[in-house]
């Protein structure tokens, strides 16, 4: 009786590990934002632009906190400075050591987006900005001390970043703003191109932001495969990501972010971590069970 | 520094909200190095006096206190119990509830820690005390996992370890088997003789201590008479079986030990053997066990038990602590299913409360009503019996307690109430688990009378006990257990006569077959 | 083991748990706690502690998940709540192991002198719970042997009164005993202060390392400590972090602690 209970317990523990394996490649990703509020975050490191549809944990958050949320939700690497009031590093790019102007003249430029592709240079620091549902934020690494000289983020609308659930290809919208023809039809990338991807690029602003979407925006070119990887094949991701080589916008799935930030990356194999966890949990459970058995047979407590 | 370890000067004490004095005009002196015994019926003031000896009365209990108690030269009114802790240690009746810490070793050190004794000294005393009470193997155990007997020894050890000059104990052997009791009393005696410690203990099982003590305090109704043990015991009309024999036979002085009794009586008895006791043939079988094995988890507690008990038998189940007595009763009661074999009562698997009624070791576990009568009524109702509680109360001799709150009664009275509550169910097999704590002679008599009547009415009574004298007085059959097996089963005279450890005083004095003082007195007459 | 070693272990395990909602990491921590419990638990009243706290944990998790139904219900929010609940449950399980592997009074001894009284009170309170639970079983059986069933509201007094009254009597006896043995007398000394064995040192260091690694991971946002629920994604586990949690299992492979700590 006791062994049965112990075994059952061990199984219960192992369940979370089993579950993804069981679910297999079903499109597992839930899609909606339904109910939860979101803000769009665009990060351009100079070589790559990644976008994030960040779920807010309050009705309004500071710009700094938005970055932190992106960090916990998507694994966006960041480092703050000046007592946590300024952004020094994003996605591995930037000054280290807490002095955000350590690499001056390059630094992280802070922009507010109007949701339809336009951007304005932030007048005050991210620590005092107030971001709510539907707002858009941008960070660009480069030089230039004002909105006229510093590179701006690509012209993306809010709906480009935070798509709703229907799988559709998401060609970045035309510079005129707003996406028409965006967000309908097929899955982003992977399914190819949907409506012929017009538009795209910012056009405005110097340097940095490349665009031109191109029809073969592939989804998650960096994504590891496996259940997570296949997940990337589906529409569900919200955030278009720009591929450095082709200048195409590429989805930032949590997976890609994980892959970027984390050392291991099979890129096409079984979910190593999950399997390992399952094995470890089972081993510990069995070990504990054997120890108990031995104690009981010795007449111990 | 006075000679007196303990001195009472005209002490009067009344507990709060009571109408009678618990102690009245008590004046006594106990010298250093005395082994003193407090004897008397329960409720007469023994516990109160014991508690007055370390300041618990009145500091802990409250109440009205007059007079003066001096302990080791200190006035207890000026010194609260914790200030007296270096001079006097107290071991209460229920040792299990008095443990503070978890491990035996730590429990022993607790008192010394409070006194600020230095660690090296503490370690030495702990080792010595473990050896003295023979509990070294238990040192790392949790006190909660100990048996009743082990707990009592640990409690005594914990009191001793702190090195007091005065030791006060309330019924310290009630849960110990004869071996354990002998051991404990011998240890106390050694302390008195070799180290000059003063020991004051209250005890009902006088056969275990009467021969060793220097001084007796006889209690009746709050009054205390102090004197040599023989005298006090004779005047109180209670005492160990040898003393009872002495009284019945008109001997003066009354013998207190087996040796004295032998000296006085052997010549008179001569070669006459014990009378052939007419053991009534048992009626039809009521309780049967065949090939019974009972386990605690994976560990066998009883092995290969085969017993048949007929109506009219009163069976004493005896054995060392841990031999399996309680387990046997629980298996017969129907609450512990045997791993192997069959237990039947009246031909079928026993249903607790219907075929069997068992009174637990701690009677307080079942008492919950407002009055004694209500307690009995509860059982009657549960069993669907329409009669009133009076017959059962009368059978146990407690009809005068009908309106009292069970928890206000003495320990012995509570046991009788619990037995009544169990007996009210009219189960043919009545089982009693170690009815020894607080059982003063008065309660014992009533219990014996009840058991005899129950057997005469065609029932079966079984007692798990290590009270040899109780078994000698009431049992028609003795079953001896050791290591979970039956090693002896039969006539009390034979089984008890055969045993060195479990022999009653009459047997020790006059030979196998002699069980009770009444028997011997009759033979001498 | 030195009670302080266990205290450090439990705190570090708690910290690690606190940093993450990843079900793989949490499962691993629970498995580690079970393993350590099985290997090192002290026989006695707290021996069943793991089971008790595991059940409490499952209940907590269920309740936390159920709370979602007061707001928007979708896979994401349920998953989020479930993971939060799982984290709480894991904390409880860690405490359950801690309870079973230490003598509460041994931990009390660690308290600085000023806190001795409240610490002792806490330990005594902690020891009352298992005793009361044991007493309920005893009373239930005793009443059964007299023919009284104690199921249901009507018969609650038959169960509750003996338990409560006996509990009270025992509390009074305990207080009496402590008073008579000099409690609160003043300057105290310590019997056999616990010593730091090699094993205790090793397990402490391992626990501290594990906590440090996870703190770093948390501050740098790496390691997937918080799998995303909005949008709902399948969590993953980093082998390095799994191995770090395994450091907390070290007490389980050390020689079994003797009951004398």
Image: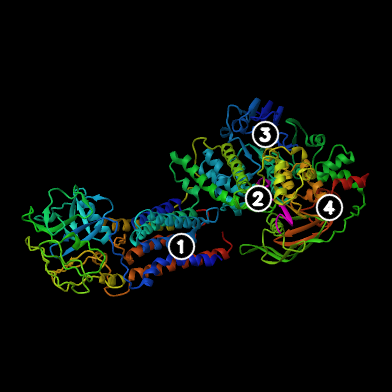
* Colouring chosen for the image of the structure: rainbow
Magenta range is B351-364
Q: Where residue B29 appears, x then y in whole percent?
A: 70, 29
Q: CA distance from mark 2 to mark 3?
A: 24 Å
Is disc 4 on the same chain as disc 2?
yes
Count neighbours of disc 1 (C-alpha within 10 A) and say few if under 14, some if 14 to 19, many if 20 or more.
many
Q: Is residue B356 magenta?
A: yes
Q: Nearer the viewer, residue A217 or A164?
A: A164
Above or below, B309 relative to B53:
below
- Number of numbered callouts drawn: 4
Q: Is residue B88 left or right of residue A12?
A: right
The answer to whether residue B127 is seen in the rendering is: yes
The answer to whether residue C205 is seen in the rendering is: no
Mark 1 = which residue? C35
Q: Where residue B1 appears, x then y in whole percent?
A: 62, 28
Q: CA distance from mark 2 to mark 4?
A: 34 Å
Q: Residue at x 63, y 45 (%)?
A: B95
**Res. B48 mark:** 3
Q: CA distance from mark 1 to mark 4?
A: 59 Å
Q: Is residue B446 left or right of residue C106?
A: right
Q: Secondary structure at mark 3?
A: helix
Count neighbours of disc 3 (C-alpha within 10 A) and say few if under 14, some if 14 to 19, many if 20 or more.
many
């Amino acid at each position: 009786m006791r062994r049965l209970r112990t075994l059952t317990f061990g199984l219960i523990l192992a369940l979370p590990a089993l579950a993804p394996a069981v679910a297999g490649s079903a499109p597992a990703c839930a899609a909606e934002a339904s109910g939860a509020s979101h803000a769009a975050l665009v990060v351009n490191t100079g070589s790559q632009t990644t976008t994030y549809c960040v779920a807010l944990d309050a009705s309004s958050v500071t710009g700094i906190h938005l970055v932190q949320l992106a960090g916990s939700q998507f694994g966006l690497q960041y480092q703050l400075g000046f007592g946590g009031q300024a952004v020094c590093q994003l996605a591995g790019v930037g000054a280290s050591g807490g002095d955000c102007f350590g690499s001056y003249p390059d630094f992280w430029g802070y922009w507010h987006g109007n949701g339809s592709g336009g951007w304005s240079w932030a007048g005050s620091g991210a620590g005092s900005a107030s971001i709510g549902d539907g707002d858009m934020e941008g960070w660009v690494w480069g030089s230039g001390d004002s909105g006229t000289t510093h590179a701006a983020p690509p012209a993306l609308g809010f709906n480009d970043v935070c798509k709703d659930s229907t799988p559709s290809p998401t060609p970045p919208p035309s510079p005129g703003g707003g996406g028409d023809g965006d967000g309908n039809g097929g899955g982003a990338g992977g399914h190819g191109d949907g409506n012929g991807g017009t538009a795209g690029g910012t056009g405005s602003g110097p340097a940095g932001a490349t665009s031109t979407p191109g029809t073969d925006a592939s989804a998650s070119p960096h994504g590891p495969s496996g259940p997570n990887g296949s997940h990337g094949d589906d529409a569900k991701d919200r955030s278009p990501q720009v591929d450095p080589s082709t200048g195409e916008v590429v989805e930032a799935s949590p997976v890609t972010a994980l892959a970027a930030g984390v050392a291991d990356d099979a890129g096409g194999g079984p979910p190593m971590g999950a399997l390992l966890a399952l094995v470890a949990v089972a081993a510990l459970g069995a070990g504990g069970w054997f120890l108990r058995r031995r104690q009981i047979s010795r007449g111990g407590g | 520094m006075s000679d007196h370890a303990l001195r009472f000067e005209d002490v009067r004490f009344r507990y709060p909200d009571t109408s009678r004095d618990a102690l009245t005009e008590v004046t006594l002196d106990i010298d250093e190095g005395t082994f003193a015994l407090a004897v008397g019926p329960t409720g007469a003031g023994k516990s109160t006096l014991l508690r007055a000896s370390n300041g618990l009365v009145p500091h802990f209990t409250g109440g009205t206190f007059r007079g003066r108690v001096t302990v080791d030269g200190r006035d207890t009114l000026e010194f609260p119990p914790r200030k007296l802790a270096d001079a006097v240690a107290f071991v209460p009746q229920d040792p299990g509830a008095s443990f503070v810490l978890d491990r035996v070793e730590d429990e022993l050190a607790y008192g010394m820690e409070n006194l600020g004794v230095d660690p090296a000294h503490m370690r030495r005393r702990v080792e010595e005390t473990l050896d003295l009470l023979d509990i070294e193997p238990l040192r790392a155990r949790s006190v909660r996992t100990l048996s009743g007997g082990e707990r009592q020894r640990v409690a005594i050890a914990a009191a001793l370890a702190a090195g007091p000059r005065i030791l006060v104990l309330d019924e310290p052997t009630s849960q110990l088997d004869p071996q354990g009791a002998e051991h404990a009393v011998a240890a106390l005696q050694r302390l008195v003789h070799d180290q000059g410690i003063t020991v004051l203990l209250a005890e009902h099982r006088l056969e275990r201590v009467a021969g060793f003590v220097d001084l007796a305090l006889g209690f009746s109704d709050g009054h205390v008479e102090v004197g040599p043990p023989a005298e006090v015991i004779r005047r109180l009309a209670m005492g160990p079986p040898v003393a009872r024999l002495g009284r019945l036979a008109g001997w003066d002085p009354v013998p207190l030990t087996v040796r004295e009794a032998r000296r006085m009586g052997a010549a008179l008895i001569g070669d006459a053997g014990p009378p052939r006791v007419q053991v009534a043939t048992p009626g039809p079988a009521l309780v049967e066990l065949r090939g019974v094995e009972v386990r605690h988890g994976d560990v066998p507690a009883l092995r290969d038990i085969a017993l048949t008990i007929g109506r009219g038998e009163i069976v004493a189940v005896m054995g060392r602590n841990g031999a399996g007595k309680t387990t046997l009763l629980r298996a017969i009661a129907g609450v512990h299913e045997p791993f192997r074999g069959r237990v039947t009562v009246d031909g079928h698997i026993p249903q607790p409360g219907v075929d069997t009624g068992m009174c637990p070791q701690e009677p307080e576990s079942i008492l919950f009503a407002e009055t004694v009568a209500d307690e009995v009524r509860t059982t009657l109702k549960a069993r669907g019996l329409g009669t009133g509680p009076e017959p059962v109360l009368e059978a146990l001799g407690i009809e005068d307690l009908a309106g009292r709150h069970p928890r206000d009664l003495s320990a012995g009275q509570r046991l009788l109430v619990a037995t009544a509550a169990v007996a009210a169910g009219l189960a043919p097999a009545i089982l009693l688990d170690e009815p020894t704590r607080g059982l003063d002679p008065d309660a014992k008599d009533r219990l014996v009378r009840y058991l005899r009547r129950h057997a005469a009415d065609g029932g079966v009574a079984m007692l798990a006990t290590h009270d040899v004298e109780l078994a000698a007085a009431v049992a028609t059959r003795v079953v001896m257990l050791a290591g979970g097996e039956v090693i002896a089963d039969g006539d009390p005279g034979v089984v008890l006569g055969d045993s060195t450890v479990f022999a009653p005083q009459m047997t020790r004095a006059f030979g196998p077959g002699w069980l009770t003082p009444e028997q011997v007195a009759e033979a001498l007459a | 083991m030195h009670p302080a070693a266990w205290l450090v272990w439990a705190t570090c395990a708690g910290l690690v748990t606190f940093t993450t909602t990843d079900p793989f990491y949490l499962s691993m921590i629970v498995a580690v706690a079970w393993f350590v419990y099985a290997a090192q638990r002290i026989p006695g009243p707290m021996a069943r502690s793991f089971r008790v706290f595991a059940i409490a944990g499952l209940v907590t998790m269920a309740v936390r998940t159920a709370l979602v139904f007061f707001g928007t219900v979708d896979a994401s929010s349920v998953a989020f709540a479930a993971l939060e609940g799982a984290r709480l449950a894991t904390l409880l399980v860690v405490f359950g192991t801690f309870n079973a592997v230490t003598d509460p009074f041994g931990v009390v001894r660690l308290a600085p002198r000023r806190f001795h009284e409240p610490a002792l009170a806490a330990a005594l309170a902690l020891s009352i719970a298992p005793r009361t639970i044991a007493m309920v079983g005893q009373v239930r059986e005793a009443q059964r042997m007299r023919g009284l069933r104690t199921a249901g509201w009507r018969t609650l007094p038959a169960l509750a009164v003996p338990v409560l009254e006996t509990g009270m009597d025992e509390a009074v006896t305990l207080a009496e005993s402590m008073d008579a043995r000099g409690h609160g007398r003043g300057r105290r000394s310590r019997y056999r202060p616990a010593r730091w064995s090699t094993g205790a040192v090793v397990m402490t260091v391992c626990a501290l390392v594990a906590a440090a690694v996870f703190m770093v991971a948390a501050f740098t946002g790496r390691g997937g400590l918080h799998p995303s629920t909005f949008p709902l994604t399948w969590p993953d586990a980093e082998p390095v972090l799994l191995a770090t949690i395994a450091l907390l299992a070290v007490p389980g492979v050390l020689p079994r602690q003797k009951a004398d700590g």
